Image (tube, coloured by chain):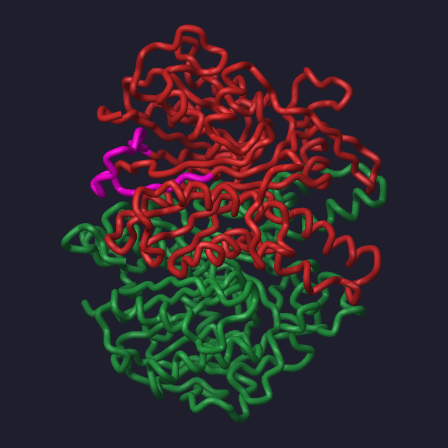
Amino acid sequence: MNSRKRNPRRVAVVAAGIVSPLGFGLTETLQSLRRARDSVTPVTAFPVDKTRCKTAAQIDDERLLNKARRSRRDRRLHRASHMVIAALAELLEAAPEFPPEIAIVGTTSGGMSFGEKFYRTLGNGNGCSAALIANYPPQKQIVDAMEKFGINVPAEVIANACASGTNAIGHAFNAIRAGRYLRILAGGYDALSELVFVGFDSLQAATPEKCRPFDSNRSGMVLGEGAALFALEELESARSRGAEILGEIIGYGISTDNHHLTQPNPDGSGPRRAMEQALAQAGLAPNQVGYINAHGTATILNDSAEGKAIMELFGDVPVSSTKSMMGHSLGAAGAIEAVVTVLALQHQFLPPNINFRESDLPLNVVANEARDAQFDCAVSNSFGFGGTNATIVFRKFAR
Amino acid sequence: MSLSIAGMSWVTPLGSNVDGVWQRLLSGETAPIDILENEQNGARYLVHRVPANTPFPAHPRLRRASAVSRFAAAAGLAALAQAERAPSLDRVAVVFAISNGGVIYTRRFYSEIVTSGAQAASPLLFPETVFNAPASHLAAILGINGASYTVVGDGAVGILALKVAEDLLASDDLDLCLVVGAEEIDPLVCEAYRQWRFLRNQNKPTGRGMIVSEGAGAVLLERCDEGSGSSATTIEQIVPGRNFFRRSEAAAQLAAVVGRLENGIGFGVGSANATFIDGAERAAVGDALPLYSPKIALGESVGASVLWQLIVAAQALKTGTLPGTLNLPASSRAFVLACGLNQQTGGLTLQLSKAA
């Protein structure tokens, strides 16, 4: 987006919070990424005896809900709310002086499992708790989390399928860049639910095997869950208050692929347009990018379309899909992977693409082990149902 | 940033022609009431439905699409067709407001899981359950391949979608933004509202409680400096409000929104739907200002409702009339106020341009 202002503002990431199957918080996440940890386990949240797939990357409820058990109000909240609370707690611990003007977040299903419970309860002929209904809607989880920490700002909740988190961060970036806000809380969240799990199972987009992005024997995605948030701030504002700066967002691209509701155009034109836009806004040539955190769902169609676009645009820039370790967390994925990309830039390493053997695409895949590397800029991709494609470009912050 | 309304359209239970529905609202008509039955528990709900003879666009993308997508396509296409000059589609964005989404297919899909087992769940239904499916269909029908955002929330979500559009139009990369709000009716949603004690009792059609409705509203927006000379109305200010954590706080949050809207307002178009929102809005606005809610005639369409309110306010400014108000003060400025059932608030001001 070319801002109508002559001097677009620079946008800093001043804090982050994350909870994913790879761990609670930035430190655990970093350790898991470096160790190439596979967090996929058998599904326990709902019956999977009649589905092809039996596994997902899940967040440990014992840890997630431990604190919530002490409060009657918190006990009523959805798991997704607790994920956002955990991410926001970490963010605010690092940046207690961060009063956002607005929250822009992504999700695909909010408190979906409460909706499922409501439906099942109705079928049993029983009355239902109003708390289930009130806590189900997809905007509720971010509002719950903000309320927990005394924050009350409007919440724009973007539901652009699997690109939601990236779209939320990208839109927030553009809004600050255009001078419309100084500080935005941006990110995404989604919790595993039976409806969505069965949905991807029915489409045979999910795999009963290992998740192998970009591998020639890839057979589909494994679902995940989690939440991640960024505190985004106009750079000069952040500098003037002496905030620690984790990185910069310098480009964002968004495109819509009208080929099919659930399948990308095989020519990769949709992802390519998003990546080209993001690079153009960042003012970068493709060879200035040192790492690509790919959407990489490990479905046949996504990886071939995305891989084609990456090959054509970037050549042999190192690529990995961290979904291989932590599954596809849908509306949270873009936000979680954005945090992963910032960690990679900060700590100068390439997160691994595990379960990888060989590729049918001539990509420079970061196979199975993390690698140390020196690079200044990195890209994170997210694509989704509805043909939505989104790309963000990050830059290591040079003081 | 001021935004000019370059086109607007709706699909409502009172029809799909903007002027036609407006005349019916002025004459005091309310949408016909249907009864919707819930096969799961036998409950019956009062609803306002879009007339069965409403024409919808024919397009392969809509063959299997849920009703919400057809409503959205009809309203969106009609609004875009009003653009003064043929838009360059790579410079048009779509922003979609929705609350319950493709709930008909969502319920059917989950029902298959519950009744027949996961192995019986149809892969044809699942993609239509995704919130951004209607926006995707609309973009495909229109040939828009740039930015498309689906914004979810409660009855105030339309304000947030309009704010997203305003932020998008801050970029020189875009000329136009098509904002569409849409919703469809399903017994599952009605039952949720009933158990939440917001729904009107089917035995008391004139009593308290809201009536759920369906349809879509669409507005085509451009920056005022794009020089659309014939545009009658502009959105001067969009104010997404803070959240109310308890219903008792709704009036205060709405008052904060009203306080941020500009002065010189002649009347308001609110979101009263025969629930707690009525009192909260009146308390926020005070008794002096004429305040009309189209939800009394058209029902609660949640994701579509703010777009309907916006169109009503634009029509009221244009005609100098407001349904149910005999002596409307002469004014070129009005506000739209939105309060959802689940914590969100917001508002905007609308101005009739001098040229009009």
Q: Residue at x 74, y 74 (%)?
A: A52
Q: Is residue A83 visible?
A: no
- The image position of residue B337, as x and y in percent, is 43, 26
Is B112 left or right of A389, judged from the image as shown? right
Is B229 a magenta residue? Answer: yes
- The image position of residue A272, as x and y in percent, is 38, 73
Residue at the limit of the structure toward the left, as seen here:
A6
Q: Is residue B286 visible?
A: yes
- The image position of residue B112, as x and y in percent, is 78, 57
Is B107 left or right of A94, judged from the image as shown? right
Quarter occupied by the N terminus of chain B: top left
Is B240 a magenta residue? Answer: no
Is B53 left or right of B230, judged from the image as shown? right
- The image position of residue A85, as x and y in percent, is 51, 51
| Nearest the eye: B192 or A225 | B192
Residue at the limit of the structure toward the bottom, as seen here:
A358
| A125, above or below B285, in the image | below
| Nearest the eye: A32 or A7 | A7
| Nearest the eye: B25 or A24 | B25
**Drawn colour of chain A?**
green
Q: How many marks?
A: 0
**Drawn colour of chain B?**
red
Q: Residue at x 59, y 47 (%)?
A: B101
Is B273 left or right of A334, judged from the image as shown? right
Magenta span: B218-237
Q: For residue A222, what is the image quadrant? A: bottom right
Quarter occupied by the C terminus of chain B: top left
Q: Residue at x 73, y 23 (%)?
A: B201
